[in-house]
Image (cartoon, helix red, strand yellow):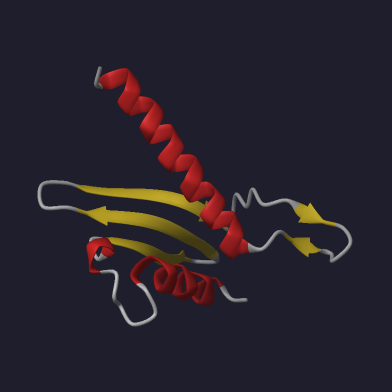
Amino acid sequence: MKTEEVVDRLMCRLWGKEAEKEHNFSHSFIYSKAGHIESISLQMNEENYSVNIELWNSENDDREWIESINDYDDLFYHILWKYEKVISSLLELKKDLIQ
């Protein structure tokens, strides 16, 4: 699956197939390419702030290499796993900052 297709699939999951999840519209997954390097970021645009978090890039691909299929772990599920890690980190930070 191409990187752009992975982002489309992530957006479909985030917003819904018919864009029915309006509460998530301020969040999006962004595909970008600079030269030969591709990346996927999570972007959150709220009224008073904006956050952009790069979840993956092809130059520093941290997915697991699977010998049996001679390919990397599925990018879609890897991004979901990274998203969960980011959320967990932010929740930990929140515990430390807001007591």
Quarter of the figure with residue 43: bottom left
- Give the side of residue 56 with respect to residue 29, left or right: right
Quarter of the figure with residue 32: bottom left
Residue at the right extreme of this rendering: 68
| Quadrant assignment for the N terminus | bottom right
Q: Residue at x 39, y 63 (%)?
A: 29
Q: What is the x, y in percent for residue 25?
A: 25, 66
Q: What is the x, y in percent for residue 50?
A: 21, 49
Nearer the observer, 36 or 56: 56
Q: Residue at x 47, y 49 (%)?
A: 83
| Quadrant assignment for the C terminus | top left
Residue at the front extreme of this rendering: 20
The number of numbered badges drawn on the structure is: 0
Residue at the bottom extreme of this rendering: 18
Q: Residue at x 27, y 20 (%)?
A: 97
- Give the side of residue 6 with respect to residue 22, left or right: right
Q: What is the x, y in percent for residue 27?
A: 29, 59
> Where 63 sits versus 24, above or below?
above
